[in-house]
Amino acid sequence: MWLILAIGMFAVAVVFTMLGQGGGTLYTPLQVWMGIGFHEAATTSLFLIMVTSVAASIVFAKAKRIDWPLALAMETVTTAGGFLGGLGSGLLSGGTLSLIFAVVIGGAAVFMIRPMKERAPCANGRGGFLAWGRTLGEQSYCVNMALALPLSFLAGALSGMVGVGGGIINVTLMVLVLGVPMDIAVASSALMVGLTASGGFAGHLLHGCWDSKLSLVLAAAVFIGGQIGSRLTVRLDKRKLKVGFGWFLLVIAATMVFKALR
């Protein structure tokens, strides 16, 4: 059983790391399908997201793809939003939340797939109030923090409400709204999902629902997968990466609609 799980987790880590995701969307279901209790599976999943994040961040950091200040600033308010979103999730039905989320993600997917002109960096007052000019490697871009912080909070709240990984919304927000280049958004998101998962893992750990032996075996698989996926991402053309992420969003949106209408 452990070998089958390790192979599955490895594959998930490779694909999801390339998209700036933690992999929790499949880490937990794979374990449950193999007969592992949900609470243990969820705890192990959070641990594996942390490991995947570390593996990817090592590669992305060496390639100078992570915007550390921006990622940490956004992660702070995203986490707060996620906490409040989880608390307020009972205000709307699960089906309604899923449909709302699917519409948002589906719309974002269209803009990811279709060609879009990238925004110019800060110059001559461009960028709006609290514009933050960023330069990473050979790439320059401008982030309006007056938009970034409140939208990150709302993104976290939406993620918390529907119970999905924040990576999906992190990348979408950074690319489509904030004008962050796709490869930097993916790399920064890979770091952010690990930080988010660490808080959840600490909470689950206090309940004692963790199979440390299984987690360490699977951690080796996802670490290698995370390294491979991130190395592939560094070599990919930004346009191809953006289109691939768009199709990924469409699949997620279709899945949410299917679940809501069942």
Image: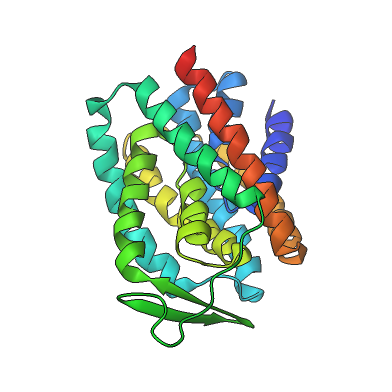
Residue 239 percent location from the top left of the image: 71, 60
Residue 228 or residue 179, whichever sits in front? 179
Q: Quadrant of the N terminus?
A: top right
Say left or right for 85 vs 27.
left
In the picture as drawn, the residue positioned furthest to the bottom comes out as 124
Residue 154 percent location from the top left of the image: 32, 49
Q: Is residue 200 above or below residue 2?
A: below
Residue shown at 30% from the left, 75% from the top: 129
Residue 217 appears in the rendering:
no
Chosen colour scheme: rainbow
Residue 251 or residue 160, whichever sits in front? 251
Count of residue discs = 0
Residue 41 or residue 157, whichever sits in front? 157
Q: Residue 253, located in which quarter of the rendered image?
A: top right
Residue shown at 69% from the left, 46% from the top: 15
Residue 69 or residue 51, whichever sits in front? 69
Q: Residue 204, located in which quarter of the rendered image?
A: top left
Residue shown at 66% from the left, 41% from the top: 247
Say left or right for 128 vs 177.
left
Residue 151 percent location from the top left of the image: 34, 55
Residue 33 appears in the rendering:
yes
Residue 28 percent location from the top left of the image: 53, 31
